Image (cartoon, helix red, strand yellow):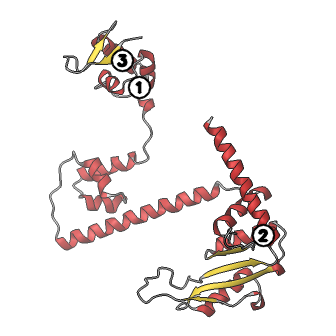
Amino acid sequence: MTDIRRRPGDGTGGLRTGAATFESLREQAVALRREGLSRREIRDRLAVHNNDILNRLLEGEPPPEWTKRPNAKDDLRDRARELRLQGLTYDRIQAELGCSKSSISLWVRDLPKPERRRTTEEASDIAKRGWERTLAVRDEERQRTKRQAAAEIDALSDRELFILGVGLYWAEGSKDKPYDRRERVIFTNSDPDMIRVYLTWLRRLGVKGEHLRYSIMIHETADVTRAEEFWARFVGVGAGRFLKTTLKGHSPKTTRKNTGENYYGCLAIRVLQSAGLYRRIEGWWCGIVGAASEADHRNRT
């Protein structure tokens, strides 16, 4: 093994060599690099485990092509450089490609700047269109990611739905406290999709529809009647299954974000005579925690 250690204040930049001089070691490193070896392979081959020294040994030597990770923005960068050479400004390139001006700056900063030949109003309009294009590209990427992620979820097995529902309830459902005994199954949420999954889970547990009662909690300034009609249609039951709606007041100084035509408040779903079910849910959750802890222990050892 080559003896390479740092020693401050000498003429070799802090290196002390034993059997091999720095120059001969660099020749070996460069030769290995040109054979196509990666930094890790060279490090292991020469037993050089100090990154600073390894950097000096490989200084000026480009990595082999196979070690370079593909960059999804390579095509955008090339196109941005083409447009810059055609005389386009950052704003116009942004409007054309939809990428951020900070990225464009990094890609083309070594190229000559075009001569500006537009008014302030024209520049402002181009900048606005560029930003709108960037937002559109980001939204397309966001929606594409969501679609791809949704496609990764296949049909749920009964057990998967069961475990999902336990976690969902423990996150959003009412829980018993030593200082406040509440062994009742009550789930409250404003997201219709979450409500749909929860109701599916209850059916998976064998809970009958006649054992459910519903109530709405909503701000007093909202359209209460419209919200009551929405939730009744959503769960598919008559008004007789709904308890009295709870109106939430708020200070005039409060700035609410949950407004608009799609605001329907929160729906609370109660399971009647559910102390036994609640205890089982709590037990299921404890089982999940224990199983997850065991799995984590196995992964760490």
- The residue at 78%/91% (across/down) is 240
Name which residue type carries label 1. Arg
As drawn, the label of residue 39 is 1
State which quadrant residue 39 falls in. top left
- The residue closer to the viewer here, 91 or 235, is 235
The label on residue 202 is: 2
User: Pointer 2 and pointer 3: residues touching (CB < 8 Å)?
Assistant: no
Q: Is residue 94 left or right of residue 157?
A: left
The mark that comes first in sequence, 1 or 2, is 1
- Please say whether residue 162 is visible from this viewpoint: no
Relative image position of residue 131 (x, y in whole percent): 33, 66
- Residue type at numbered disc 2: Leu
Residue with the mark numbered 3: 29
Q: Nearer the viewer, residue 84 or 69?
A: 69
Q: Residue at x 44, y 40 (%)?
A: 70
Structural distance between the alpha carbons of marks 1 and 2: 56 Å
Q: What amino acid type should be assigned to the residue bearing mark 3? A: Ala
Q: List x then y, in percent, for residue 296.
A: 64, 43
User: Which secondary structure lies at badge 1?
Assistant: helix
How far across and how far down the image is residue 193, in percent? 65, 71
Q: Position of residue 285 (x, y in %)?
A: 72, 58
Q: CA distance from mark 2 to mark 3?
A: 65 Å
Give the quarter of the image for residue 9. Answer: top left
Q: Residues within 10 Å of mark 1 (few under 14, many from 20)?
A: some
Is tag 3's residue or tag 1's residue first in the polypeptide sequence? Answer: 3
- Does 238 sit above or below residue 163? below
Q: Residue furthest bottom?
A: 225
